[in-house]
């Protein structure tokens, strides 16, 4: 547990070697932490607005930050010194990222702009304002030749990083603003998460929609691929009564390009009141009988009266077929969505 910020934390990122974590918060500060000890190594002061996005450089020596003061800053990780202040945005900077070679930074702003900056000079080399509303997320392709952006105008666009021209898109289909976008590690796909409670996977060359993943009514706030492209993860939030939020983290198994439409959510979480010991025994027996090959682990939830059941890859048929119905009827369970 990393404690020190005095306001909401809006962005976090690991260093490439996983030895550091950088966090940005509403207290206008950036903090760099040691992942082994939890010690705060640096507190970076300079922004005069809440920190909305943070990212490490590919070599781990620098950090880039975007904030509500319309500024992008580049910092030295070892000394905490601010190396560059990038001026140009007129509104809050919601997303920042380094290019794979560390020589450029891309930023997206409430002012509808996507900007690409030269790290050494601090010069803005590309400025694009094709989105019609705020740009919430930006990312470089693995080869650094393209940039993807997601916007409140409900579209995704892919840009040429040298010219700033839109080469693919706008990709249309989301019914609400797009919160998060990124490329797959091989650069062939783009994933987008939006407030319409869906995640969409697109072909990065043609813009063809490959898949729509349902997040169960929750709004995706961040999306990413695993390094081997076999998993796609999504963090979501759902606003409930009296401003209570429900947070969850879904992971999808992508079993191969041809089999994407057989994808299933993982983990699948069932919730059960276990005051009754006999009911708990029936619960485990039922899972073993019907879904035994897929059980990953059974553990207590934060609420001691609940049990969380983590299932590894489960085909849609198993979730929607008679097996799930039998368990639901027998134990009066329901999935936590």
Image (spheres, grey):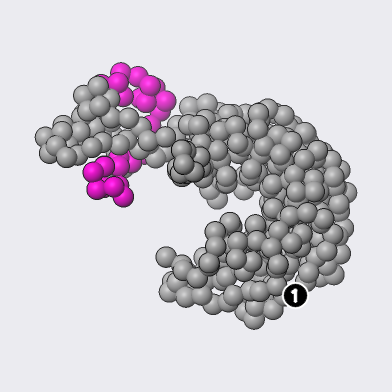
Q: Which residue is mark 1?
A: 83
The image quarter containing residue 75 is bottom right
Say which residue appears at 46% left-offset and 68% top-offset: 3
Place of residue 212 in the rendered image (x, y in percent of width and height, measured from the top left) = 58, 29
281 in the magenta segment: no
Which quadrant, please, contains the N terminus? bottom left
Q: Is residue 19 left or right of residue 277?
A: right
Q: Residue lying furthest left in this view?
A: 278
The image shows residue 170, relative to residue 316, as above or below, that is below
Where is residue 105 shown, x and y percent of the image? Answer: 75, 60
Instruction: Give the magenta part as a residue range.
Output: 300-327
Residue at position x 11%, y 35% from top? 278
Q: Position of residue 154 (x, y in %)?
A: 70, 34
> Residue at the spot x=25%, y=27% of the render?
332
Q: Nearer the viewer, residue 253 or 276?
A: 276
Answer yes or no: is residue 13 visible. no
Using the rendered view, name the quadrant where residue 77 is placed: bottom right
């Amino acid at each position: 547990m990393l404690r020190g910020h005095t306001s909401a934390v809006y962005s976090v990122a690991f260093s490439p070697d996983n030895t550091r974590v950088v966090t940005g918060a509403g207290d206008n500060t950036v903090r760099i932490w040691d992942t082994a000890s939890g010690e705060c190594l640096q507190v970076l002061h300079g922004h005069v607005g809440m920190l909305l996005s943070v990212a490490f450089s590919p070599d781990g020596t620098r950090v880039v930050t975007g904030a509500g003061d319309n500024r992008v800053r580049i910092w030295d990780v070892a000394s905490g010194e601010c190396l560059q202040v990038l001026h140009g945005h007129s509104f809050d900077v919601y997303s920042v990222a380094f290019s794979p070679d560390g020589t450029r930074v891309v930023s997206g702003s409430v002012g509808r702009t996507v900007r690409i900056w030269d790290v050494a000079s601090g010069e803005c080399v590309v400025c694009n304002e094709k989105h019609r509303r705020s740009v919430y997320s930006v990312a470089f392709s693995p080869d650094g030749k393209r940039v993807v952006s997601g916007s409140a105008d409900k579209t995704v666009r892919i840009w040429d990083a040298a010219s700033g021209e839109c080469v693919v898109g706008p990709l249309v289909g989301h019914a609400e603003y797009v919160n998060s976008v990124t490329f797959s590690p091989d650069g062939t796909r783009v994933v987008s998460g939006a407030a319409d409670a869906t995640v969409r996977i697109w072909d990065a060359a043609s813009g063809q929609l490959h898949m729509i993943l349902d997040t169960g009514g929750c709004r995706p706030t961040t999306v990413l691929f695993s390094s081997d492209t076999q998993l796609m993860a999504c963090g979501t939030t759902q606003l409930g009564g009296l401003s209570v939020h429900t947070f969850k983290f879904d992971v999808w198994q992508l079993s191969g390009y041809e089999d994407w439409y057989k994808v299933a959510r993982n983990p699948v979480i069932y919730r059960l009141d276990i005051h009754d010991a006999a009911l708990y025994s029936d619960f485990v027996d039922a899972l073993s009988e019907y879904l035994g090959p897929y059980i990953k682990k059974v553990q207590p939830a934060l609420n001691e009266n609940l049990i969380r059941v983590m299932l590894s890859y489960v085909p849609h048929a198993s979730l929607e077929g008679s097996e799930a119905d039998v368990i639901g009827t027998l134990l009066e369970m329901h999935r936590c969505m």
